Structure formats: C-alpha cells, structure tokens
Amino acid sequence: MVAMERVDWTDPDLQRLVSDQETEVDSRYDDQDHDNHLDAETVTVAVLARDDDGTAVACGVLRDPAPAFDAGTGELNRMFVHPDHRRRGIGKEILRALEAAAQERKLGQLVLETGIQQPEAIGLYTSEGYRIIDNYPPYEDELDSRCFAKAIGAEG
C-alpha cells in the first residue's frame, strides 16, 4: 500500500527519484541527454508515492501546457517506480493521480514520450488507454522514442 502526495518540483525525495530515473534510462540508451527543461516553473504537478514507512518509492510529473502542443494538452514526464517496488501497481496509481490532476486543470489530452527500451512503460501506457502518436518535438527525430496520447475528462 502506498500513499500519494503532491509535492513541489524542488522536493528532495522527488529529485532523488528523478536522478534514479535518469540513471536507469542512461543504462538502457547511449544518449544521455536529459535537457527537457523541467523546473519549478514548467512542472505544474508533481506526485510521489510513499510506502508504509514514508519512503518515497515512485514519482511522476505533469507539465501544463505541453510545450509542443496548444493549451489543453498536458505532458506526463519523469514517471518512475523504484525497482524494489515494481509490479505492485504503483506506476498505475501515479499515472491515475496525474490524470486526476490534469482533469482538475480541465485538460482535454495528455501526451508523453518513452523509449523502445522500456517495454514495461509501454505496457503500462497502452493498458491505460494511451495510443501511439507521431513523435512530437523535441522527439520527432529520435528513433528510440515512442510518443503516446490519451483523451481525458468526460470524453476520455
């Protein structure tokens, strides 16, 4: 069982998990470019999952609006579950918490980018109704990237 908590981008537990996520992604790909301009001004909502002892074990963030899209589209980013806590549905809980935050913000669509070397992420997103879309900027020329979108709200 985990508890969901909204935190600021600067939260130390969030930053630790973001660093862990970057390290894991680096181990799967040759390109180690993390410059996607996430900061306190661009991250609208950040969510942590804490286990029973209060340790932050998973995270995800929402940007609103997504830089490559018009208003009404948010972008999910930095979705990560610590390896010791995987296969327990925590990623799905983070995803749903971010979708709820997007609905509160009256967004009509969420988009995200993940990589072909992350089949567990692709499985999560497709099982939750996300569909593959053309890669959007800045990922349009990235062969290892897969972009997804989902309509949310009353129609989603």
Image (spheres, rainbow, N blue to C red):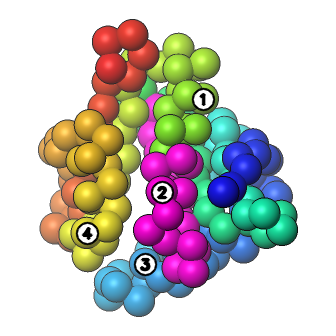
Give the CA distance from mark 1 to mark 4: 25 Å
- Identified by mark 4, the residue type is Pro
Viewer-side residue, 130 vs 12 = 130
In the picture shown, does residue 122 fall above or below 150? below
Circle 2 SS class: loop
Give the CA distance from mark 1 to mark 3: 26 Å
Badge 3, how many Cα within 10 Å: few under 14, some, many 20+?
some
Residue 98 among magenta residues: no
Badge 2, how many Cα within 10 Å: few under 14, some, many 20+?
few
Q: Earlier in the sequence, mark 2 or mark 3?
A: 3
Give the CA distance from mark 2 to mark 3: 20 Å
Circle 1 SS class: helix
Q: Quadrant of the N terminus?
A: bottom right
User: Which label belongs to residue 25?
Assistant: 3
Q: Earlier in the sequence, mark 2 or mark 1?
A: 2
In the rendered image, which quarter is residue 132 located in? top left
Q: Which residue is mark 2?
A: 89
Q: Earlier in the sequence, mark 1 or mark 4?
A: 1
Q: Which of pointers 1 and 3 indicates the residue nearer the eye?
A: 1
